[in-house]
Amino acid sequence: MKLKTKWSKADNWALAKRTLAYFKEYKYRIIISFVALVLVSLSTAGTAFLVQPAIDEIFINKDKKALAYIPFLVILLFGLKGLFLYINEYLLSYCKIKVLGRIRRELYAKMTSLPLRFFEENRPGMLMSRINSDVGMLSSSLPKVIELIRHIVTMIGLLGVVFYRDPFLAALSLVIYPLAIYPFIYFAKKLRKFGRKAQVIGADMSNFLYETFGGIRVIKAFAAESKENQNYILENSRMINIALKENRYSHASTPVMEFLGSIGIALIVWYGGSQVIAGHSTPGTFFSFMAALILLYEPVKGLNKVNVAIQKALAGAERVFEVLDSPELKIEEGGKHELEPPFESLRFKNVTFSYPGAESPAVRDITLDVKQGEKLAIVGPSGSGKTTLINLLPRFYEQQEGEIYLNGRPTREYTLPSLRMFMGIVAQDNFLFNTNIKSNIAYSMDDVDENKIIEAAKAAYAHDFIMELPQGYDTVIGERGVKLSGGQKQRITIARALLKNPPLLILDEATSALDTESERIVQKALDNLMRERTSIVIAHRLSTVLSSDRIIVMSKARIVAQGTHDELLKSNPLYRKLYEMQFLDETSSDILNQPSEI
């Protein structure tokens, strides 16, 4: 489920149409903007047109009437041009901001609705870049297209003035312009190519920084600051190199266009000047022509700049629609039935699941029944398939064979929200958000009474340490709960599960990362959580599951034994080996932790 570029060889027009469709709902604002754009272009052409009467009537014929009205017309034209330019740019910016928000919402909604496998195969920095950088580039497409049209309309108006003043001279001046078509196309292709590469490298850089700052404790623990600095220098060099190449072509295009324009202007000055000297034209006509031609150069140069921006916008569009339109990126789909409490039964029937690209299944031909109110434990060596098995329950992954039945119905037939709210999952490394404790406990639950939050915290043995914090339940705990200890974080997640009040509870090595003292407190909280609930417990430390109603032993993706603790000690060599290894470790640990009598 890795992202693959769909649009890399697509027709630019198809990609542009897909992009511009987002602006359709703002068509009336765009129409007004377009009318304002035409008026701006006409104002520019009108300014060039006024040069001829200004020179001939005022400076040569010394006409006082012309002196009275021509300066007024100049002020009027520039005033109207400024007004219409404001209307044009304001409305386009409004549409751009609105579309930017909409595309980001759609992209975020699509990404968060994709299966977990998508996030395992695509780096967070790259996904962040799609939403932030790529969408920003894409949303500028319509304003740049309108700007392109503005330049074209301005050129048409100025060409009208040029041909009106001197058709032959106009034709002569335009001989050179077709030569600009080739460099225009050449630079467009280069800028599109480097724009696409720049986005990919920018995403790599975002991911590098995300991992660096997220893993700063590990970096410091291994004194790897210098090594990571060298890695950053390499990543930064890649970004600099592609930016320099993009910069080279971006800035080379303008001098090329200017040089070609200078050839045309030189020919015009030579021919036009000879016409004035010979008395075949007036100075006003010539300077009006020249003014229009000089003003014509600005939209021609503007076309090149707009082309640079449009190529970047198309590069961003490729990467955005790669996510939105890819048939391979299918959002998670649930059934139509709502799963309602209470828990009645759970059955795994011949369930087999393999990770993509894996040589062998992670769980193979699992058949298992869980009864109402039962405390079921799953144990086994690392890699035996324990966590994978329970991740199939909330449909984080989809089994390739077999079926899972919950309350008599396949889990595929339930809506995903009802299925997942039916379960409470407490894992070894639960995620806490960078907000206050109250919001973390009541996550995804709206309008929860504060007293219920406090009750859940008390049952999770978290209330006392929360009240010792500077702002109590309103204390912001930092990213991933960095301001709390491991045991405190785990008790917050247990409080969250208690408040959720799920009929089915899943504990995935919930205490394995804690020290002995923290484990004892958390275990008390877990006992409160499991009371009167059906529970499935995956445990690394067998001492935490000795009181389970039934223990499942897994090895090499299969269930190899099940029974009570006493039954398994007698009948299953693997379970007995696991127990003896941990019993010796824990006994040694207890001896080492005893206070010295010396």
Image (tube, grey):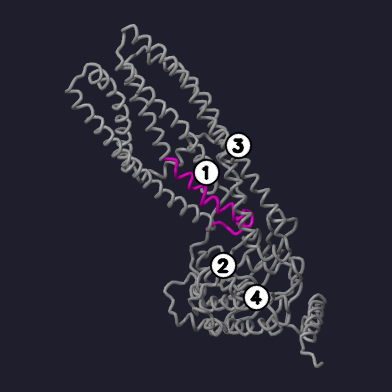
Foreground mark, 4 or 2, reads 2
Foreground mark, 3 or 4, reads 3
Residue at 80 percent of width and 87 percent of height: 591
On the image, the x and y values in percent for residue 31 come to 32, 39
Please tell me which of labels 4 and 2 falls first in the chain.
2
Disc 4 residue type (three-letter): Ala
Q: Residues within 10 Å of mark 1 (few under 14, many from 20)?
A: many
Question: What residue would you read off at disc 3?
Answer: 245
Please tell me which of labels 4 and 1 falls first in the chain.
1
Question: What residue would you read off at disc 4?
Answer: 510
Q: Residues within 10 Å of mark 3 (few under 14, many from 20)?
A: some
Disc 1 residue type (three-letter): Gly
Q: Residues within 10 Å of mark 2 (few under 14, many from 20)?
A: few
Question: What residue would you read off at disc 1?
Answer: 316
The answer to whether mark 2 and mark 3 are in CB contact below 8 A is no
Disc 3 residue type (three-letter): Lys
Q: How many marks?
A: 4
Residue at 67 percent of width and 72 percent of height: 368
Q: CA distance from mark 4 to mark 2?
A: 20 Å
497 or 99, which lies in front?
A: 99
Q: Which of the labelled discs sits on residue 479, or is there none?
A: 2
Which residue range is magenta in the image? Answer: 113-142
Q: CA distance from mark 3 to mark 1?
A: 18 Å
The answer to whether mark 3 and mark 4 are in CB contact below 8 A is no
